[in-house]
Image: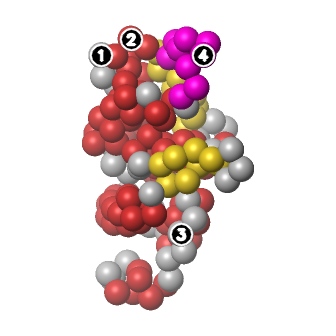
Amino acid sequence: MSTTIKVDANHLNGLDLSPAQAVIDKWISEGSIAAQGQQIRFEIDFPREPEDPRELSEIPEVRLWFIRLDARYPWLPYLLDWEAGELGRYTAMLVPHQFSPTEGIQFNPEALEIFVMGKVFVLIDWLQQQNSFSRTKVKFLTQMVGYEIDDAFFDLIGA
């Protein structure tokens, strides 16, 4: 089951997180936030000129909205629909990248590493607070963006 959060130009231009807050805060208040894993999808409606070649992740207003969302809910990647590509799109909103017609999205490697490891630390702490920690889930999330984390890493930090 997936949950679609619809975001339009008014939300983006006003940095209004209310569409996401309505869903996420409800789950938090119900105490079921960790159980909702991997179901959020975003539907973004931001008008562009027909000749505008930019991807949504290249539009400053869209990126800034996602930066604010990530600051509010730093563990949000856990809730995204990974299989539908939402984790990749979310990452593109926060990590510098380029598009290649043949290779697709190419993230800045150092920026991606910093982003992934930051999210790993956030998710480990958050999932432990939710009594839902799973090495497998955290490892799978990192694999979705091209990273492998060895079990020795989890041992090192006591997770």
Q: Amino acid at mark 3?
A: Tyr
Task: Identify residue for label 3.
Answer: 147
Region of the chain picked out in magenta, as a range: 45-54
Task: Identify residue for label 4.
Answer: 51
Q: What secondary structure is marked by label 2? A: helix
Residue 50: within the magenta?
Answer: yes
Q: Amino acid at mark 1?
A: Gly
Question: Depth check: 59 or 150 in front?
Answer: 59
Q: Is residue 99 left or right of residue 75?
A: right
Q: Position of residue 26 (x, y in %)?
A: 40, 31
Q: Position of residue 135 (x, y in %)?
A: 50, 73
The vertical placement of 23 against 36, above or below, is above
Task: Name the quadrant containing residue 71.
Answer: top left
Judged by depth in the image, the label closer to the viewer, 1 or 4, is 4
The vertical placement of 113 against 16, above or below, is below
Give the CA distance from mark 2 to mark 1. 6 Å
Whichever of labels 4 and 3 marks the residue nearer the N terminus, that label is 4
Q: How is the image coloured?
A: secondary structure
Q: What secondary structure is marked by label 3? A: loop
Task: Identify residue for label 1.
Answer: 14
Q: Which mark is residue 10?
A: 2
Give the CA distance from mark 1 to mark 4. 25 Å
Dot 1: within a 10 Å radius of its alpha carbon, few (fewer than 14), some, or many (20 or more) residues?
few
Give the CA distance from mark 3 to mark 2. 35 Å
- Residue lying at 43% horizontally and 14% vertically, measured from the top left: 9
The vertical placement of 37 against 155, above or below, is above
Is the C-beta separation of discs 3 and 2 under 8 Å?
no
Give the CA distance from mark 2 to mark 4. 22 Å
Q: Position of residue 154 (x, y in %)?
A: 41, 81
